[in-house]
Image (cartoon, helix red, strand yellow):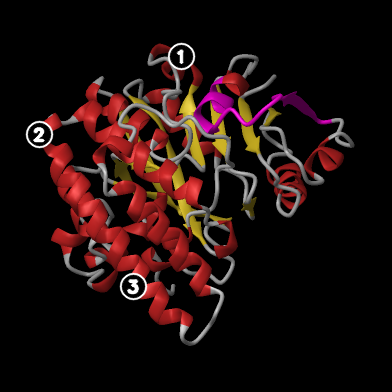
């Protein structure tokens, strides 16, 4: 009997997907599960790896349809009571404790939850869980205050205090890269909003769950390895644009449109600041110059509000690693 349907969206994921699947085989062998993989038209060796597997259901998209739409497509044929959305760069070291499923079964108002993420080096990823993002959180993030002063709560309101990441407790936000949810509730709220191509689709679904009266839980006692942000070269102009476009759509959807001019101004300041920082870094390592150029290009296109798409992203790029998460981490 299938208890949990593990859904993975791949896009040029050959570096990670093999190890991810092997860790699932080891850690989920005593839990009735199925693996559904939706491939967003990978061009590398991802499909060569997946086609050799007999233990997965592979859904191939003819083009990159984005993360949210691919997740929803993977959820439709799922037969498990629980849906477990994970990124292909996730590795499990331990099985999910049975007590988690017992707790979810007993509490009808708890929709699901997530786990404690670390980099391979052991650094914490604060982005794994926290609170719902509000407009002023965007302000502090764009100005870099959350990274410069990680212990000041007002600048880090979207994150838990550091000491809370090691414990089990309720949460408002769970990262979509490792997101467990009851299938019935996922269907009730119509899954992920497909107007997000990539980024903020997880914040959106957590916000909708909260608005519907559902709760989420964070299990800090279970650690997973997430290779998030380990490849800076994956920062592209289109991925940066997707990030900002998703932010605008999220804030427009849940907050007053009067916030949008303020958010636009703050985003421009943040983009320019990052350009300056990476130009400075390029004096020591030339590869940072290309990153600086990408931020400056997005800054120039962002200066004209007409160029900012407040509704959706119509691009065909992969769901890339968020390299800035390295600034949201701390040594264990």
Residue at (41% x, 18% y) in the render: 185
Quadrant in which the C terminus appears: bottom left
Quadrant in which the N terminus appears: top right
* Residue 120 occupies quadrant: bottom right
Per the rendering, the mark at residue 187 is 1
Mark 1 secondary-structure assignment: helix
Query: Which residues are the magenta region?
Result: 55-72
Q: Is residue 274 above or below residue 165?
A: below
- Crowd around label 1: few <14 · some 14–19 · many ≥20 (10 Å): few
Mark 3 secondary-structure assignment: helix
Which of the two residues, 59 or 257, is positioned nearer the viewer here? Answer: 257
Q: Is residue 4 left or right of residue 271?
A: right
Task: Indicate yes or no whether the magenta region holds residue 85.
Answer: no
Q: Is residue 180 above or below residue 297?
A: above
Which of the two residues, 119 or 194, is positioned nearer the viewer here? Answer: 194
Per the rendering, the mark at residue 138 is none
* Location of mark 2 (residue): 258
Q: Nearer the viewer, mark 1 or mark 2?
A: 2
- Residue 59, how many percent across, how many down? 72, 23
- Crowd around label 2: few <14 · some 14–19 · many ≥20 (10 Å): few
Inspect this view and state whether residue 126 appears: yes
* Location of mark 3 (residue): 276
Q: Residue furthest right?
A: 52
Question: Disc 3 and disc 1: Cα gap in Å?
Answer: 45 Å
């Amino acid at each position: 009997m299938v208890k949990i349907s593990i859904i993975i969206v791949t896009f040029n994921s050959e570096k990670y997907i093999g190890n991810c699947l092997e860790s699932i085989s080891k850690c989920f062998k005593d839990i009735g599960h199925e693996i559904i993989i939706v491939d967003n038209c990978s061009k590398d060796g991802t499909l060569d790896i997946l086609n050799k597997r007999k233990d997965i259901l592979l859904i191939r998209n003819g083009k990159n349809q984005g993360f949210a739409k691919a997740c929803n497509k993977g959820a439709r044929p799922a037969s498990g009571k629980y849906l477990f959305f994970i990124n292909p760069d996730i590795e499990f070291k331990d099985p999910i404790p049975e007590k988690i499923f017992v707790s979810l079964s007993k509490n009808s108002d708890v929709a699901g939850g997530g786990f404690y993420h670390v980099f391979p080096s052991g650094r914490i990823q604060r982005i794994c869980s926290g609170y719902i993002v509000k407009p002023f959180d965007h302000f502090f993030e764009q100005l870099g205050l959350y990274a410069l002063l990680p212990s000041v709560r007002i600048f880090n309101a979207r994150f838990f205090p550091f000491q809370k990441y090691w414990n089990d407790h309720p949460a408002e936000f769970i990262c979509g890269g490792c997101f467990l949810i009851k299938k019935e509730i996922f269907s009730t709220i119509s899954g992920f909003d497909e107007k997000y191509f990539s980024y903020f689709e997880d914040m959106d679904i957590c916000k909708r769950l909260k608005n519907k009266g559902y709760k989420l839980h964070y299990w800090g006692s279970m650690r997973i390895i997430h290779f998030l942000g380990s490849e800076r070269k994956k920062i592209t102009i289109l991925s940066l644009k997707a990030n900002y476009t998703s932010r605008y759509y999220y804030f427009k959807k849940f907050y007053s449109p009067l916030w949008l001019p303020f958010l636009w101004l703050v985003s421009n300041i943040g983009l320019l600041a990052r350009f300056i920082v990476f130009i400075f870094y390029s004096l020591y390592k030339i590869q940072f110059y290309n990153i600086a150029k990408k931020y400056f290009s997005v800054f120039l296109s962002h200066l004209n509000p007409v160029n900012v798409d407040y509704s959706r992203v119509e691009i065909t790029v992969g769901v890339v690693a968020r390299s800035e998460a390295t600034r949201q981490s701390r040594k264990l």
